[in-house]
Image (tube, grey):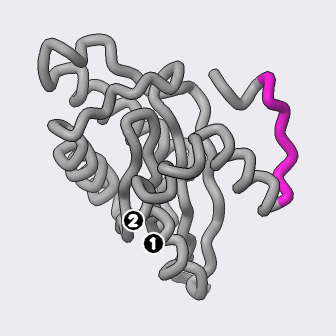
Amino acid sequence: MPQSLGYSNIHIIFSTKDRLPIISPEIEQDLYSYICGICRTYNCHVYEINGMPDHIHILLEQHRTISVSELIGKIKANSSKWVSGHSKGYKNFSWQRGYGYFSVGKQQIDAVRKYVKRQKEHHKKTGFEDEVKSIYTKLKIKFDERYVWD
């Protein structure tokens, strides 16, 4: 096959460093727009982006020319610089070192979009750590809590 083709959807989750609740409503939508712009730069289509003051969810179609780890690295590094330069209250903004990502089949996109879109409702009942543990458990991903929360 002379042409390289691929199709991959992923759900990405990562938190602020030490899960500090510092993504304020004042910058939230601008931050999400900025992250969508980073993704467009790498030919990745964002289906949905949302989060809470201490973490973010991104559902996107990953382009075949960039690896998941490289894409997440670009998102985190560039958005961190953007937030740090946004205003005085964000000078030391940074994301946690780690992240979670999960493949999403075409049939699951609508359900995951709805899940990401409803984060604020969801977190009235469930905290970030419980949410992540629940996802890992549901997907049968083995994890060691000593290394999940940095």
Residue 68, x across and y down, in percent: 56, 51
Query: Would residue 147 be counted in the magenta stretch?
Result: no
Dot 1 amino acid type: Arg
Residue 140, by quadrant, is bottom right
Residue 8, x across and y down, in percent: 56, 71
Do the residues under discs 2 and 1 have CB atoms within 8 angstroms? yes
Residue at left offset 87%, top offset 46%: 142
Residue 50, by quadrant, is bottom left
Question: What residue sits right under mark 1 in the picture?
Answer: 113
Q: Please report the bounds of the magenta region as a residue range.
A: 140-146
Residue at left offset 48%, top offset 50%: 124
Query: 43 or 114, which lies in front?
Result: 114
Give the vertical position of 30 relative to 86 (above or below).
Answer: below
Which quadrant: the N terminus?
bottom right
Query: 120 or 17, which lies in front?
Result: 120
Residue at left offset 49%, top offset 22%: 17
Which quadrant: the C terminus?
top right
Using residue 27 as the reference point, say whether residue 68 is left or right of it: right
Give the vertical position of 2 relative to 51 (above or below).
Answer: below
Residue 119, by quadrant, is bottom left
Can you see residue 62?
no
Question: What residue sits right under mark 2 in the picture?
Answer: 117
Query: Would residue 141 be counted in the magenta stretch?
Result: yes
Dot 2 amino acid type: Lys
Using residue 100 as the reference point, say whether residue 85 is left or right of it: left
Circle 1 packing at 10 Å, graded few (<14), some (14-19), many (20+), is some
Using residue 111 as the reference point, say whether residue 43 is left or right of it: left
